[in-house]
Amino acid sequence: MHKANSFLIAGLLLIPSLAAASAQGIDLQALLHMTLPQELGRVSEAAQPVAASSSPKIVILIEDAHVNAGAQRNLAGIIRYLADAYQVRLILVEGGDGDVGLSYMREWMPEEMRRSMAEDYLAQGMLSGEEYADLVSDQPLVLWGIEDRALYEANFQAFLEANELQPALAKHLAFARQLVKALLPKLGNAPLRQYLSQRSAFAAGTLELSGYVRFLGELCLSLGIDGGLFPHTVRFLEIQQSEQTKDAQQLALEQKQVIEQIVSQCPREAVKPLIDAAKALQAKTGSRQAYNQELARLIQAYSISLEPFPQVKRYLRREELKEAFDARQLLNETREMEKAAGARLAASEEERALVSFERDLLLRENLVGLKWQPADYEEYSREKNAGWFSHWLPWLKERAAKAGLPWEAQQESVALQVDSDLNRMVRFYQAARERESAMALHVADKLLREKGAAAVLIVGGFHTESLRALLHEQGLATIVVSPAVSEKNDPDRYATVMRRKRFGKFKAQETMAEVRE
């Protein structure tokens, strides 16, 4: 093979390694089309407001997986990447107001000691990803809290109240769930019985999301429900199937062979963008997505057949699907598939009542577990919920009697209290919503005062959609970023850490100050 071609192939197969980006101003257009190293996370959406200027200020919304150590490390990596590659160093955070940075601690101790301490606090959930980055990085980051303290404190008090209500409410809902489970074997409608059993397993955490989505997808298909209504579900299932046939060793071999064909068949100037993408990937200033796009472009432009390379063909298709996939939309589609399948399967008034009750029950189980997504809050807000448990209690008692199941008389005496406590639980989410307008105003104000072109905003996933719309109203463009999550969230751990941290970022500063003393 020609020596120049050998050099090109070697360059295109480089293994990524860390390198610093050149120091230059923020390129807004480049930022609007930004990508991320795949191991850190993904860009799920970039959007400008309707009346955007040609160079709008940009807010990079990072969805925070609270106290998830793996996700927090990736969040810290994203902050370092944005600072290195795009010079974005203004980091706006919930849970505090004003200067909440920890960079002043860099003078107190050497980097190795800071990193060791930061790892320990991160593992405990007492340090967030942005605080970790600020503590161990050499970048001049600015961490700035954008809360209205009074609104945050009200939300925190609502959290403490919800936390106190959880045990008793969980007990009452568990009684209702056990009754539903006991009724299932007595259902003559076998498909409906299986549907409700799978929903119960998913609610209990014994069935993973992937298995549940696969079940719902196949069920909807069998019921003649149009799969085109659920595009993210279709993508998810295709990705899952493709992953099962992946052969990493064979893929690496095929990639090398495809690169050899590209270098031998394509003009050097046509290959240059791919070389640049490979170099950027090596330096961690570019992404696997950009590299794949250049690779796919050359394959298509020069009619390179992938039939001899099935692993590469599946890989490129898989990556294309991942870029178009949105996990939040998958959850929304899951909800719609549940409704559509339940409506098709329930053939009688009795069965429709059972499906309706079970759906309402799952919504409230997720409320009590503090697992609500924005769509859950919206659904609950549209309903008449003042006396949900009291309304269904006679129906539950009658079904229990017909099925010969035991009945706990105390359920009747506490029904009104259960309804009241459920509505008090909702106050936590209402208070979270009330914080968002103030946060959006503070974001716009800080960008204006700093004369900044772009900033990172780190908030929990519950706030993302609402804040995105509010920021657009302020004339700001948004990019939504989701850090990679490799481990499950632990709601109990989140509650424990929240109680310890109180007013989050201020508590972190106090904790770090104690370390110095």
Image: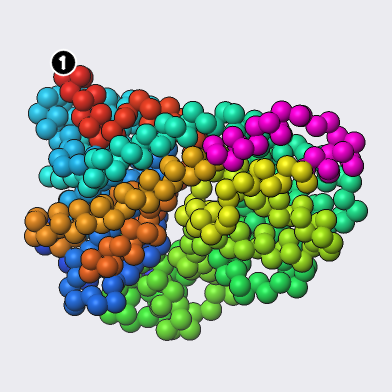
Given the current orientation, which residue lies at the most extreme top position? 517
Asked which secondary structure carries label 1, the reply is loop
Q: Amino acid at mark 1?
A: Glu
| 269 relative to 172, above or below | below
- For this view, does 408 lie left or right of residue 116? right
Residue drawn 42% across the image and 84% down it? 301
| 508 relative to 444, above or below | above
Q: Can residue 408 be found in the magenta stretch?
A: yes
Check the picture and name the quadrant holding the C terminus.
top left
Q: Quadrant of residue 447?
A: bottom left
**Residue 37 coordinates in the image, percent (x, y):** 35, 55
Residue drawn 33% across the image and 45% down it? 75
Can residue 317 be seen at all in this image of the molecule? yes
Can residue 310 be seen at all in this image of the molecule? no
Q: Give the total number of marks visible in the rendering.
A: 1
Q: Main secondary structure of the magenta part?
A: helix
In this view, the residue in front, 131 or 351, is: 351
**Residue 289 coordinates in the image, percent (x, y):** 39, 64
Q: Residues within 10 Å of mark 1 (few under 14, many from 20)?
A: few
| 493 relative to 264, above or below | above
In this view, the residue in front, 440 or 54, is: 440
**Residue 488 coordinates in the image, percent (x, y):** 51, 39
Per the rendered image, the range of residues in magenta is 396-421
Residue drawn 59% across the image and 34% down it? 417
| 405 relative to 475, above or below | above
- For this view, does 313 lie left or right of residue 131? right
Check the picture and name the quadrant holding the N terminus.
bottom left
Q: Can residue 177 be found in the magenta stretch?
A: no
- For this view, does 130 lie left or right of residue 173? left
The residue pinned by badge 1 equals 517
